[in-house]
Amino acid sequence: MRINLQQSMKMSQQMKLAPRMIQSMEILQLPVMALQERVDQELAENVTLEVEDRDRTVSETEEKAERERAKDENERSESEKGPMEVDNDDGNADDFERLVDMAESWPEDNYTSGSKPSSNRVAEAGDRAFDAMANAPARTQSLHDSLVEQFGYFDTTPEVRAFGTYLIQNLDEDGRLQSGLPDLMSAYGRAVTYEDAERALSLIQKLDPPGVGARSVQECLLLQLNDELEYREELEVLISRHLEDLAANRLPAIQRKTGYDLETITAAAEELSHLNPHPGREFRSVPAQAVTPDLAVDRDDDGNYSVRLLDEYTPNLRISKYYIKQLRNNPDAATKEYIKKKIEGAQWLIESIEQRNQTVKKVTEAIVEHQRDFLDKGPEHIHPLKMEEIAEKVGVHVTTVSRAVSDKWVQTPRGLFPLRQFFGGGTTTEDGEDVSWNQIRLKLKAIIEGEDKKKPLSDDALVEALKEDGYNLARRTVTKYRKKMGIPSSRQRREYV
């Protein structure tokens, strides 16, 4: 094999995002609670970043002195210095010199020894921690723990008890076994007779909740039958032989096969609907996701709407005056470089948060202006809206709008909504009116709720009913939205009695 080395030149274009731009996009996408966590993390890692007390009051004399100092500082600043910006090439030498000069004009007693939160901030953090501990739900008992505890009350042999505990650990979240006894005995790894295995399984199937330990849906439902049920015998037949026909609402077919009349089949099916094919799920605790709105929409007495940021969870940040002064007073070059990098990071964060708040508010104001009918009249009056329209109105890229509304919630007079809910496509009625898909879904739901259940409307009939109201849609579109809404077909909706 011969290896040749040669040099070549080529031109190519690459787009690289600056660290500051990446951080701005990340901050923009964060909801308010995630932003608070990010700020807390930065406060712990960046000693030059500190919290400004929202409740700090300043006397008129102090305000006047502060204005005079700011005026003097502006007069000393040269016009070519311009706004403070982050420049990676020269290390922001001019900006840091300006920070040092500003620090010299601040009163000595305002210096801090580091990044210390205000007393109010400490109190708020303590209150939040206390509330979190007080509202934390107690750990609920799992399905396996409950069954093992109940199984311990049976007087049985050590072999049955050991294999029964093994079977309980192999139940899925529905409380069912996904394998048969022979397979489980083979995987057990210890000698156990088939009689002991059957005995252990039969004991488990007597535990609460009823239906645990089943190996199929049919067996799970059969285990829940008891003598108190009026149609127990009929239910045994229906569950064992005609469960698929019941699911498809093929009651006449069941009538022909069993000889039961429709009233009996319907009454038995009603009792069947009260049985639980997933008994283990009642032990599965899914914590409710707390939603904290980022914005609020208020309506005044004249019917006008205004948008305000709910930023009480996010503290006001500033750069520590103490560390700005250390840039000049500390003789160690390495320390100065460390402080400069930390101040640069703090400045980036403060500006990114400010830009996030402005962008989110502007985007929400544009959404509120477009969806005024929704706020005035209700969800059925929401208009079709694309992110491109809001991007053009606000003057940003469409990806910026997408990040601005991501995981953000707004509190309105109509309730709490995610910002993304206000976006969506639509169609045009025969009268030329633009309507959203949400309006069409609400109309479709109303038509189905008002139909004759003995003769439910087919999808073709739903198309005609929507057309009478001016919504000209294809049959496949109606079918798609019916399925998305969880509405069964006309045959499954039919009531025979």
Image (cartoon, rainbow, N blue to C red):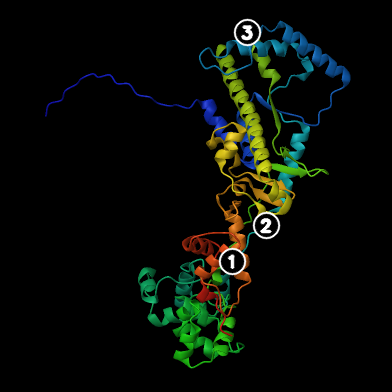
- Report x, y in % for residue 266: 57, 85
What residue does disc 1 label? 283
Q: Residue at x 73, y 10 (%)?
A: 73
Q: Which secondary structure, mark 2? A: loop
- Residue farthest along the bottom direction in this orientation: 259
What residue does disc 3 label? 80
**Marks 1 and 2, how far apart at CA:** 14 Å
Dot in front, 3 or 2: 3
Looking at marks 1 and 2 on the same chain, the residue that comes earlier in the sequence is marked by: 2
Q: Which secondary structure, mark 1? A: helix
Looking at marks 3 and 2 on the same chain, the residue that comes earlier in the sequence is marked by: 3
Q: Is residue 158 left or right of residue 96?
A: left
Label 2: few (<14), some (14–19) or many (≥20) C-alpha neighbours in 10 Å? few
- Report x, y in % for residue 225: 55, 84
Residue 391 picture quarter: top right
What residue does disc 2 label? 137
What quarter of the picture does the N terminus occupy? top left
Q: Residue at x 69, y 22 (%)?
A: 320
Q: Which secondary structure, mark 3? A: helix
Tag 2: residue type?
Answer: Pro
- Report x, y in % for residue 118: 75, 30
**Marks 3 and 2, how far apart at CA:** 60 Å
Looking at marks 1 and 3 on the same chain, the residue that comes earlier in the sequence is marked by: 3
